[in-house]
Image (cartoon, rainbow, N blue to C red):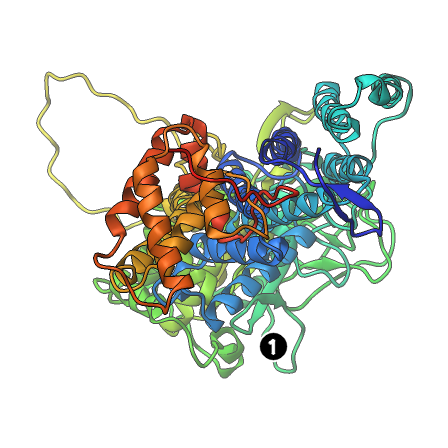
């Protein structure tokens, strides 16, 4: 029978055999592996699965090995191993060789803080950014440790069941999606197996576990039937699972909310509009001028801010007028989308709405955009390329606020701006070069890459990372171009609103009806030119239209006719031609944690698995080296070998009694054992004089014969999980002082 030990709750816990310990941990591992699949409703992709599985597996094996070896403080050891492995995976640059440093702790804390921001700002499912993968992997590792601790309690099965239920329910509470029935049934079935194992007394009949199994089976059936008659689970998490806040709300920075809304799972129609202009319109809602280095902020009016609009346009520049009629659908805001530059008039609105002098945006202190239909007259300023090249960008000290930059910035921003514009000799061509650099270069549109690679935002550090990764969405493109323009002394700002949208049916007046959805939320750059005003430049690749003006006609020789058929390039499509992220280039390898975690975890598993063997081998080698002058280390080594092969012993054993017990093992070399026994008895019971020779060969012969006589399973366990390291030995009740067989 298994002996009983005091339990943590004051009861007794039967000591689990090695096979039972591995069985318990195997059940927990299988259940958690299944439960991990339910977390796909809150984290996208599959990369995080591999990392989480490997970290949890390594932690579980550490717990199991420590339990088998009889280590007292299993949980701290497992947590330490998990911490080191996570550091190797997520912040390897902070390690001193393989040893964590204070920088490691700071790096992990920074990642956890970043994960908190993602949780607060994003709607589930979120991209598998490194901070999120860290939190999920570390959490499952800690869950394994908690499960191991619960297994040591007297009433382990109910406690483990409660833990598994909590892990099962968490993603449903966050995302609001009811987990599949098969997942619940599979995990509950594994728990019933664990319940049966923990409630069956060794050597007793199995009827004692019957009531528990019947009760568990009935509960499982009831739980499976409950979702069929109960309402769906609703998200109750404070952050994940809730719709993101509106972009254009009172007191809300649209640059912070824009990315979150672009990554929404559902698309809502914000507005429809018609226009008398020949082209679809960009509709501006907010203007951002103030830049602290961490984020762009909505522009507040300052004394001396110059006026904008028709009066600032030089008389020599062509201007075309038109009217845009806008109908708000599902946009709820205190700010209304309008074309730029408007004529500071609007008709058809209910409530008190006013134009801002800076940016000419339309706002209200207490108004609501829902259900509003209004008409806004505006102008289309049409300078030529020559007029743009002749117009200075900085013409008045009142523009100084549009040149403000933080004192320190990553050098890549200014250096890239100078390199891109090196061939231009005027500000217009410099701005065109910047726009072309982003739209026609190696950059790609992606709403998920910045989150996955942990550089989402619009500060200077984010811009520097964006210039290296070359993947992002409108916030990154517009921010980068605006800051780079300011490094060149060109006044710039950011406009936030809606890209031109998609063309639909024709109304009764013969005008095309354009539709803007939440997917058309957009940010672009505005550059100031004296005599022209603020000019829109859209650096975001695949979105809207690039800005350029009519170049002067040059006399060029007509090309000779060619026999080859000519093909006409398709006209550029207007509107928000957003690339589907499923067709975009994959996230850079820098963000993938799975390959690195696989290598690190496998290496850690090898280290953890080989550590007992390594310690045992070093101890044996040390004893053999000392055994050439002293027989005592050899005898202690023989006792440890007996422990490793589970040979029963007694605390009252004499050397001869122990040798007699060992001699009854199959295949033991009797002559070598007798020689080693005589040697140790001579030393212990004489005057301590060492006999001739060293006895090492006798010990090696006994060890070899004992190993040859054991089963394959016993030899493997004795090598990989040597019991002698824990000092625990199978003990018999009475010492055996019998004689060696002759």
Q: Position of residue 736 (x, y in %)?
A: 56, 42
For the point 51% across and 50% down, which residue is it?
130
Q: Is residue 97 above or below residue 285?
A: below
Which residue is nearer to you in this view: 518 or 594? 594
Give the number of callouts: 1
Does residue 82 appear left or right of residue 258 in this picture? left
Q: Position of residue 172 (x, y in %)?
A: 76, 35
Mark 1 secondary-structure assignment: loop
For the point 77% across and 26% down, which residue is it?
200
* Residue farthest to the left, as pictured: 560
Q: Position of residue 338 (x, y in %)?
A: 66, 50
Does residue 427 appear left or right of residue 726 in this picture? left
Is there any visible trace of residue 84 in the rendered image? Answer: yes
Which residue is nearer to you in this view: 403 or 375? 403
Is there any visible trace of residue 456 in the rendered image? Answer: no
Q: Is residue 344 above or below residue 336?
A: below
Residue 632 figure quarter: bottom left
Does residue 635 appear left or right of residue 732 in this picture? left
Which residue is nearer to you in this view: 529 or 162? 162
Does residue 1 appear left or right of residue 205 in this picture? left
Identify residue for label 1. 305
**In the picture, which quadrant includes the N terminus?**
top right
């Amino acid at each position: 029978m298994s002996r009983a030990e005091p339990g943590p709750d004051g009861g007794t816990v039967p000591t689990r055999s090695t096979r039972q310990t591995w069985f318990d941990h195997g059940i927990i591992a299988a259940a958690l592996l299944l439960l991990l699949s339910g977390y796909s409703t809150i984290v996208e992709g599959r990369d995080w699965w591999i990392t989480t599985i490997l970290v949890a597996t390594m932690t579980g094996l550490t717990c199991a090995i420590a339990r088998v070896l009889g280590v007292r403080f299993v949980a701290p050891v497992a947590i330490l191993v998990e911490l080191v492995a996570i550091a190797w995976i997520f912040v390897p640059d902070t390690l001193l060789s393989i040893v964590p440093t204070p920088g490691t702790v700071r790096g992990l804390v920074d990642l956890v803080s970043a994960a908190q921001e993602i949780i607060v700002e994003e709607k589930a499912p979120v991209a598998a950014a490194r901070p999120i993968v860290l939190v999920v992997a570390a959490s499952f590792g800690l869950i394994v440790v908690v499960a191991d601790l619960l297994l040591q309690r007297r009433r382990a099965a109910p406690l483990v069941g409660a833990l598994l239920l909590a892990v099962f329910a968490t993603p449903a509470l966050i995302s609001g999606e009811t987990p599949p029935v098969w997942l619940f049934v599979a995990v509950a079935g594994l728990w019933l197996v664990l319940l049966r194992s923990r409630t069956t007394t060794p050597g007793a009949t199995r009827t004692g576990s019957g009531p528990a199994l019947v009760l568990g089976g009935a509960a499982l059936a009831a739980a499976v039937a409950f979702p069929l008659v109960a309402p769906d689970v609703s998200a109750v998490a404070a952050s994940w699972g809730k719709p993101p806040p509106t972009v254009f709300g009172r007191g809300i920075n649209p640059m912070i909310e824009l990315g979150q809304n672009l990554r929404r799972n559902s698309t809502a129609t914000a507005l429809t509009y018609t226009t008398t202009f020949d082209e679809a319109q960009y509709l501006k809602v907010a203007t951002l001028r103030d830049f602290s280095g961490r984020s762009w902020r909505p522009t507040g009016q300052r004394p001396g801010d110059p006026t904008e609009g028709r009066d600032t346009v030089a008389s020599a520049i062509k201007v075309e007028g038109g009217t845009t009629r806008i109908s708000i659908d599902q946009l709820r805001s205190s700010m209304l989308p309008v074309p730029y530059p408007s004529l500071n008039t609007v008709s058809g609105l209910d409530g008190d709405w006013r134009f801002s002098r800076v940016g000419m945006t339309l706002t209200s202190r207490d108004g609501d955009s829902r259900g509003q239909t209004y008409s806004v007259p505006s102008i289309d300023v049409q300078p030529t390329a020559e007029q743009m090249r002749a117009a200075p960008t900085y013409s008045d000290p009142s523009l100084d606020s549009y040149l403000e930059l933080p004192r320190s910035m990553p050098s890549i921003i200014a250096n890239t701006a100078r390199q891109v514009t090196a061939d231009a000799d005027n500000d217009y061509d410099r701005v065109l070069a910047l726009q072309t650099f982003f739209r026609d270069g190696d950059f790609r549109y992606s709403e998920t890459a910045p989150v996955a690679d942990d550089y989402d935002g619009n500060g200077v550090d984010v811009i520097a990372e964006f210039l290296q990764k070359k993947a992002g969405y409108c916030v990154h493109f517009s921010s980068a171009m605006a800051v780079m323009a300011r490094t060149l002394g060109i006044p710039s700002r950011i406009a936030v609103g809606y890209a031109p949208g998609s063309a639909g049916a024709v109304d009764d007046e013969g005008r095309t009806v354009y539709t803007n959805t939440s997917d058309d939320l957009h940010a672009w750059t505005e550059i100031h030119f004296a005599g022209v005003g603020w000019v829109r430049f859209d650096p975001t690749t695949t979105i809207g239209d690039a800005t350029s003006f009519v170049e002067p006609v040059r006399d060029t020789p007509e090309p000779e006719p060619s026999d080859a058929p000519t093909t006409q390039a398709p006209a550029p499509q207007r509107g928000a031609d957003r690339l589907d992220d499923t067709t975009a280039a994959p996230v850079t390898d820098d963000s993938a944690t799975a390959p690195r975690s696989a290598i690190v975890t496998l290496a850690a598993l090898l280290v953890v698995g080989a550590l007992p063997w390594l310690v045992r081998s070093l101890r044996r080698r040390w004893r053999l080296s000392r055994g050439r002058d002293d027989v005592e280390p050899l005898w202690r080594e023989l006792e440890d070998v007996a422990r490793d092969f589970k040979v029963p012993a007694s605390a009252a054993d004499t050397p001869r009694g122990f040798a007699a017990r060992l001699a009854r093992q199959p295949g033991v070399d009797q002559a070598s054992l007798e020689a080693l026994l005589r040697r140790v008895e001579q030393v212990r019971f004489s005057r301590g004089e060492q006999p001739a020779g060293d006895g090492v060969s006798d010990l090696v012969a006994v060890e070899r014969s004992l190993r040859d006589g054991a089963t394959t399973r016993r030899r493997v366990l004795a090598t990989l999980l040597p019991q002698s390291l824990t000092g625990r030995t199978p003990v018999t009740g009475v010492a055996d002082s019998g004689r060696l067989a002759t």
